[in-house]
Image (cartoon, helix red, strand yellow):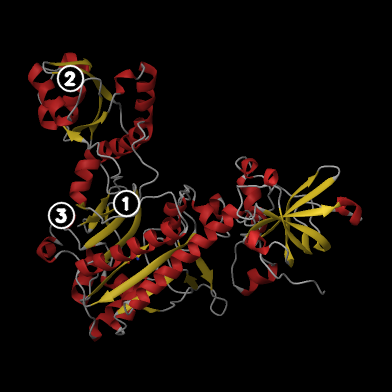
Amino acid sequence: MAFKKRTHDCGELRLANVGETVALNGWCHRIRDLGGLFFVDLRDRTGVCQLNFEIERFEDLRDLRHEFVLCVTGEVVKRAEKDVNRKVPTGEVELDVKEFDVLSTCDVLPFPLSDESQMKTAPEDLRVKHRYLDLRRPVMYRKLLIRAEAVRLIREYLHERGFVEVETPIFTRSTPEGARDYLVPYRLKPGRFYALPQSPQQYKQLLMVAGVERYFQIARCFRDEAQRADRQPEFTQLDMEMSFVYQEDILAVSEGLTRHVCNSVIEKFDLDLEPVGSFPRLTYEESVRRFGTDKPDLRFDLELFDVTETVRTCEFGVFRSAVEAGGIVRGVKYPGGADLSRKQVGELENFVKEFGAKGLAHLTVVSTDPPECKGIAKFFKREELTVIIGAADAQPNDLLLFVADKEAVVCDALARLRNLIGDRCNLRDPRKLLFCWVLDFPLVFWDEENKRWDPSHHPFVMPKTEDLSLLETDPGKVRADCYDIVCNGSEWASGSIRIHRPDIQARVFSVLGLDEEAQRRRFGHILDAFRYGAPPHGGIAPGIDRLIMYLTGDENIREVIAFPKLGGGYDPMMDTPSEIEPEQWEELGLTLRPAEDD
Ligand code: ASP
């Protein structure tokens, strides 16, 4: 079907074009029928331009609806001063329409595209179901542009430094990253399955054995795990690996890359964010001790303080018995929290209880010298109060909140409480992206439920040379050459120096409970490859989706993915996961019956 192709983009017209005859193509973004006057804002990917129709000149004008697709021809004219719209770049001109054609009509929309204020309440499932409409919104299109630019900059930065982009298979076998695998049945041998990669981890290590030395990939990863606002069943990582490097080399490349990409995007899109600076470094031990977590939000200070030794012999039974049972007592300060009502403090207590704490004790500081507090103060001697106030670095009117329990419970509850206090006291500046390094993770963690050691990252992480001798005797004490990048309290990237010697790899597999038969069956290819001259190597994998969330300020990962899945992994647009035909069950040799209709 022939149509008049555009001579200009809608968002491009300015005073300099006045007097020109131009053709535009686009969508009816907004229609204003003022009786004698009829205006349409025509939108394309570059912006909107106001069309002015002379009512008498056109029949059927009133049949136009939102999102009809038009081609129009007309003359660019200057708007009268009183009609200038300063909110849009084309606001000083409009198009006096001479001819137009409707190229496509549009049904009644499931949600209005012309009024962003109404989109705040548009149900998300409706938006995802009609994503092709949702993405027409300029705010959504801009996120696609930001993402595309970030990925372009990543490629450019890495190409300039000799990295080679290599694609690795999607149909593969299990690569453990701590989640369940998505499996694909293999038709030619029923009972066999491919696994979709939780990451390209093994392939990138094999590429190092292959001599590629500097690899990267914008890699899709698939993990079947509990869905949260910042998780999707499939997501994208910048996967990187380098040979003949120390940890420091990988930190330098990834930190340089992050700063370059963020700061270029912030500048190009004029984002309301401060430039990203150099990344502070913490060890895992230090991060957990000071902030209760390995994902600290360093935009604000508020460090946890430990009073275990001070309260060991105090009169407060709750603290004393927690310490006697081998637990700890730590606290966090709520600056100016003395004003909180009893009910509000009760709410904070309920909050920490959700994360396993049994309670939340509190002291309200009235004066620091002499020490005077309210709350549980009566259980403490004056000297004890002085030490507690000192540990908390408290001022009059501060509220000190304490959890007494096993270390893991105390840390988790207080780390979350610290973030909540950060929110309440407006300490988490949305204009800051505070990236930091967390280094020296333990190699393994004890899984009490399954009574086994689990890798803190994955099974290919190199133990620190000085801790290798503890591998069999005290695995929990072994630290690894392993590092994370954390941004504003969320994990953004993880990486490590890898094991490149088959004997060490086999020892780590054994600690993880894999006997020789299981090692051969699941990872024989890696153990074999390492026998053919594997170089020392290491890498990292920052999340692309999360990077875009940081840049756009979104808290929901679905906002930065073109076609996301809803909670539970359902895609309402394609209506998938979907049922398969009876013949397909047969062909695949699957014996389960198709899902019942719900
Ligand atoms: N494969 C790891 C992950 O997906 C990253 C890495 O160690 O490079 O977290």
- As measured in the structure, the alpha-carbon distance from the residue carrying label 1 to the one carrying label 3 is 19 Å
Please name the amino acid that badge 2 sits on: Phe
The quarter of the picture where residue 582 lies is bottom right
Frontmost residue, 48 versus 338: 48
Q: Nearer the viewer, mark 1 or mark 3?
A: 3
The quarter of the picture where residue 198 lies is bottom left
Horizontal and vertical percent for residue 308? 14, 31
Residue 450's disc number: 1
First of labels 1, 2 by sequence position: 2
- As measured in the structure, the alpha-carbon distance from the residue carrying label 1 to the one carrying label 2 is 35 Å
Residue 316's disc number: 2
Horizontal and vertical percent for residue 359? 30, 26
The quarter of the picture where residue 150 lies is bottom left
Indicate if the residue with disc 3 has its beta carbon within 8 Å of ligand 1. Answer: no
Horizontal and vertical percent for residue 398? 25, 23
- As measured in the structure, the alpha-carbon distance from the residue carrying label 3 to the one carrying label 2 is 33 Å
Label 3 sits on residue: 477
Rendered residue at 57%/60% (across/down) = 562
Ligand 1, seen in the image, is in the quarter at: bottom left
Can see residue 87? yes
